Image: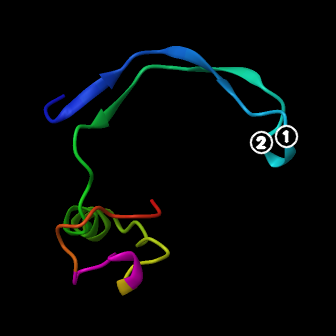
Amino acid sequence: MEGMMLIPAGEFLMGSGRGEDGPVHKVYVDSFYVDRCEVTNAQYLAFCEATGHRLPMFWGMAGFRCGPDYPDHPVVTV
């Protein structure tokens, strides 16, 4: 897949044994692809317009630099 990289399957230890982190336990994750670069606000807006998907919770908030005023910034809270 162009512009993406394969993350191989594997396992890791998750949790800390304290509070909300829960006990340390082994988690297995299947392989998956991820974009090599962040998705921009402009790219995510185009996706939402094409699919009818909802915009992120912080869309249009300057403090998060999320929205059409920041087209080249990475989209957040997706």
Q: Which residue is mark 2?
A: 21
* Left or right side of 17 for 68: left
Q: Which residues are magenta?
A: 63-69
Which label belongs to residue 47? none
Question: Residue at (24%, 67%) from the top-left corner?
Answer: 73
* Vertical relation: 19 (above or below) 34: below
Question: Residue at (52%, 14%) from the top-left corner?
Answer: 10
Q: Which quadrant is the C terminus positioned in?
A: bottom left
* Left or right side of 40 for 53: right
Question: Residue at (31%, 22%) from the top-left corner?
Answer: 6
**How far from the left and from the top, in percent, is residue 64?**
40, 76
Q: Quadrant of residue 15?
A: top right
Q: Which quadrant is the N terminus positioned in?
A: top left
Which label belongs to residue 18? 1
Main secondary-structure element of the magenta-colored stretch: loop
Q: Quadrant of residue 67?
A: bottom left
**How far from the left and from the top, in percent, is residue 43?**
21, 62
Which amino acid, by three-letter code, is at mark 1?
Arg
| Magenta highlight on residue 68 | yes
Query: Are the two marked residues, 2 and 1, in contact with CB atoms closer than 8 angstroms?
Result: yes
Could you say which is closer to the camera, residue 23 or residue 68? 23
> How is the model colour-coded?
rainbow
Q: Nearer the viewer, mark 2 or mark 1?
A: 1
